[in-house]
Amino acid sequence: MAPTWLLLVYTVPAAPSRKRAAVWRAVKSAGAVYLRDGVAALPERPASRQALAAVAALVERLGGQATLVEGARLDPQRAAALAEEARQARAAEYADLAGEAERFLAHLRAEVAHRELGAVDRAALAADLAKLERWAAQVRARDYLAAPGAAQVEALLARCRAALGEHVVGRVEAAS
């Protein structure tokens, strides 16, 4: 049996444009793919249902109308194209995240090579790593179709945690 899809069909008042922009950002944040203006799709899963239901609630709070269609069966070719579009979007996000993790590692190496890390430096680096971790969690949450790149990002984040841990824990123990 072919997988089913969730469709969010919505309209938002044209003015002010910030309402339309807010909905567009929410749809993208959910990981949905647009079929056309005002119609977004996701593979039917509990997490995707929850994500699109939240977007539908936002649309209604903004004075629009939203309908969530469950169990939609799409033409197999169209469904495959949508799935590939969603996978590619997540793969691009994973690639961006991997690049940022590599930059974090390079920055950490450069900082440690040039000077002793103080408490403020360590706190700033820990905050930067926390941002990367939150970003990764957001991408994982909308990766309904197992896009390529997830394993690479997880490995890089583990390296980031280990590298930061070496310098944070090592310096704290040395100071004790």
Image (spheres, rainbow, N blue to C red):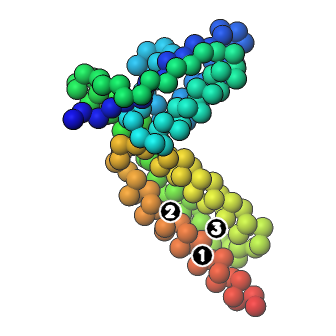
Which mark is nearer the camera, 3 or 1? 1
Front one among 140 and 123: 140
Residue shown at 67% from the left, 63% from the top: 125
Q: Are marks 3 and 1 in contact (CB under 8 Å)?
A: no
Callout 1 crowding tier (Cα within 10 Å): few <14, some 14–19, many ≥20: some
Which of disc 3 and disc 2 is earlier in sequence? Answer: 3
Q: CA distance from mark 2 to mark 1?
A: 12 Å
Q: Position of residue 57 (x, y in %)?
A: 63, 28
Using the rendered image of the protein, determine whether residue 156 is visible from the camera's viewpoint: yes
Q: Is residue 9 above or below residue 103?
A: above
Instruction: Give left or right: position of 150 versus 126.
Output: left
Q: Position of residue 36 (x, y in %)?
A: 43, 15
- The image quadrant that residue 20 belongs to is top right
Residue that numbered label 3 is attached to: 111
Front one among 66 and 164: 66
The image's mark for residue 165 is 1
**What quarter of the picture does the N terminus occupy?**
top left
Label 2 secondary element: helix
Residue shown at 55% from the left, 69% from the top: 161
Q: CA distance from mark 2 to mark 3?
A: 18 Å
Residue that numbered label 2 is attached to: 157
